[in-house]
Image: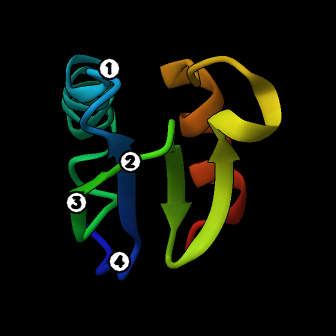
Amino acid sequence: MAYTTNRIKIEYCVPCGYLPQASELATELLQHLRHDVEAIELVTGDSGVFDVKLNDDLIYSHFDTGTFPTTKEILTTVKDKGQ
């Protein structure tokens, strides 16, 4: 197993009730990427935010798409851009 420094951060809107989507995405990513990520962090936010960052680079934004990311979208991006 290779050492990885990939870190995923999921910032979600608390007042909007986005915790279920954030925790589900984090769980699914951990199941698929457990050996390819150092950490998956959930960060509370507001104002409708649902952003996913890989190593501090924004890879998905609810503001840009108007939808929540699928696990497949994030997995593909992590595998393409990850270290």
Earlier sequence position, callout 4 versus callout 3 = 4
Using the image as rendered, state which of residue 53 and residue 65 is in the foreground. Answer: 65
Kindly identify the residue that appears in the image at 55 percent across and 18 percent down.
70
Judging by the rendered image, the residue that carries numbered circle 4 is 4
Judging by the rendered image, the residue that carries numbered circle 2 is 46
- Quadrant of the image containing the C terminus: bottom right
Q: Which mark is residue 41?
A: 3
**Which structural element holds mark 1?**
helix
Judging by the rendered image, the residue that carries numbered circle 1 is 21
Earlier sequence position, callout 1 versus callout 2 = 1
Earlier sequence position, callout 1 versus callout 3 = 1
Left of 34 or right of it: where is 18? right
* Identity, as a three-letter code, of the amino acid under mark 4: Thr
**Which structural element holds mark 3?**
strand
Q: CA distance from mark 2 to mark 3?
A: 16 Å
Q: Within 10 angstroms of label 2, few (less than 14), some, or many (20 or more) residues? A: some
Which of discs 4 and 3 lies nearer the camera? The answer is 3
Q: Within 10 angstroms of label 3, few (less than 14), some, or many (20 or more) residues? A: some
Which of discs 2 and 3 lies nearer the camera? The answer is 2
Across and down, in percent, residue 52 comes to: 51, 50
Using the image as rendered, state which of residue 6 and residue 42 is in the foreground. Answer: 42
**Which structural element holds mark 2?**
loop
Q: CA distance from mark 4 to mark 1?
A: 25 Å
24, above or below 59, in the image? above
Q: CA distance from mark 2 to mark 4?
A: 30 Å
2, above or below 23, in the image? below
Kindly identify the residue that appears in the image at 37 percent across and 60 percent down.
9
Tags 1 and 3 in contact by the CB under 8 Å rule?
no
**Which structural element holds mark 4?**
loop
